[in-house]
Image (tube, helix red, strand yellow):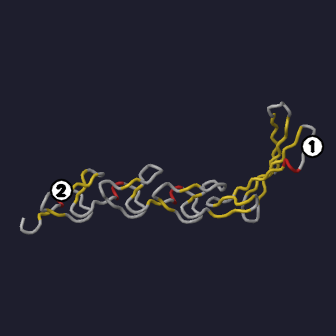
Amino acid sequence: DVFILKTKNISVVSQLIILQLELQTNNALVLNSIVATTDGSSDGSGIQTTLTCPTGQRNDSPTSCVPCSENYYGPDGVNCRACPGQSTSPAGSDKLTDCVCNKNFYRENTINCEACPSNGFSDRGATSVAQCKCPADHYKIQKETCSSCPPSSTSEVGSNNAGDCRCLENY
């Protein structure tokens, strides 16, 4: 299909911009635009090509697509965007959610990965601060803070309240 869009530039000379969409054999969509003046003339220099690739890829040239590299994602088939800090993604990723937070970080209702609080830790891909665990000899206060057990007591990794702290032997 050919779409014709009539515009006027600053010097009030009318131009026609003819847009032509082509589906390439690699499933990429190419948008060709030809700029012509009102007298119908156009020259080869007025032809511009923009390649739109499948998501997870970007245009490498006017006629070829390449997958987004590791730690990048391509939601629009034109450009690849870097994953936020402290996250990674496999090559060819197409969504922000493909960028998974590293160990000891979590993403909860934000774009960026946040560090687990109070020396807490988490597995790779944590999506909530609740998935951050307190280290041994600590327990969780509320959902965001790890506190030390009282002197002469200990707790296991991931303890969630002061009652998880147990007196050491002979105390």
Residue 40, by quadrant, is top right
Q: Mark 2 Cα within 10 Å, few/some/many (few <14, many 20+)?
A: some
Viewer-side residue, 152 vs 66 = 152
x, y percent for residue 141: 24, 52
Q: Which mark is residue 162?
A: 2
Distance Cα–Cα, label 1 vs label 2: 82 Å
Q: Position of residue 148 (x, y in %)?
A: 20, 57
| Extreme residue toward the bottom, this view | 169
Secondary element type, mark 2? helix
Q: Secondary structure at mark 1?
A: loop
Quarter-of-image position of residue 56: bottom right
Residue 114 position in % (x across, y down): 40, 53
For badge 2, the amino acid type reads Ala
Left or right for 28, reference 130: right
Q: Which mark is residue 41?
A: 1
Q: Is residue 12 above or below residue 46?
A: above
Q: Residues within 10 Å of mark 1 (few under 14, many from 20)?
A: few
Amino acid type at mark 1:
Ser
Residue 13 higher or lower than 128, as above or below? above
Q: Which quadrant is the C terminus positioned in?
A: bottom left
Residue 34 at what x, y percent from top left?
A: 84, 47
Residue that appears at 65% across and 56% down? 77
Mark identifier at residue 141: none
- Residue name at image x 50 percent, y 59 percent: 99
